[in-house]
Amino acid sequence: MPIVLFEGPKLTKEQKEELVKLFTEATVRVTGIKREAIIVLIKENEPDNVGIGGELLSKRLGS
């Protein structure tokens, strides 16, 4: 079973549903694996938990 992992910012339920649908469709098209076997995991990261260039993303964003 393939696992597709998306790490990014907080998303709405609607955005998550669209990502799951699109990632699943793309994986089926490219690999030919049945959609029932595809797992999509979404990991939301707070800006305080992400560092870029030696500083927290929250600092870069001014939050």
Image (spheres, rainbow, N blue to C red):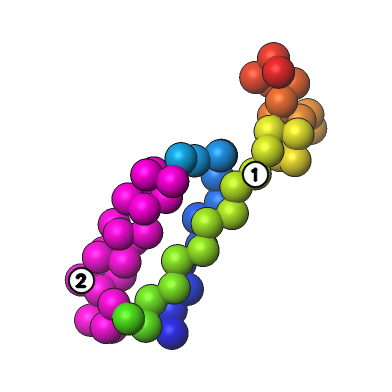
Please give left or right for residue 9 compared with residue 15 in the image: right
Observer able to see residue 61: yes
46 vs 7: above or below: above
Residue 55 image position (x, y, % from top left): 78, 29
Q: Secondary structure at mark 2?
A: helix
16 vs 31: above or below: above
Whether tag 2 and tag 1 are in contact, CB under 8 A, the answer is no
Q: Residue at x 52, y 57 (%)?
A: 42
Q: Which mark is residue 5?
A: none
Does the magenta portion include 29?
yes
Please give left or right for residue 28 compared with residue 9 in the image: left
Q: Identity of the amino acid at label 2?
A: Arg
Q: Which mark is residue 45?
A: 1
List the residue tagged with mark 2: 29
Residue 17 image position (x, y, % from top left): 36, 53
Q: Residues within 10 Å of mark 2 (few under 14, many from 20)?
A: few
Q: Residue at x 25, y 74 (%)?
A: 28
Q: Quadrant of the N terminus?
A: bottom left
Residue range in magenta is: 13-35
Q: Residues within 10 Å of mark 1 (few under 14, many from 20)?
A: few
Q: Secondary structure at mark 1?
A: loop
Q: Nearer the viewer, mark 2 or mark 1?
A: 1
Closest to the observer, 8 or 53: 8
Tell me how far mark 2 sits from mark 1, CA to CA.
Answer: 29 Å
Marked residue nearer the N-terminal end (2 or 1): 2
Q: Quadrant of residue 33?
A: bottom left
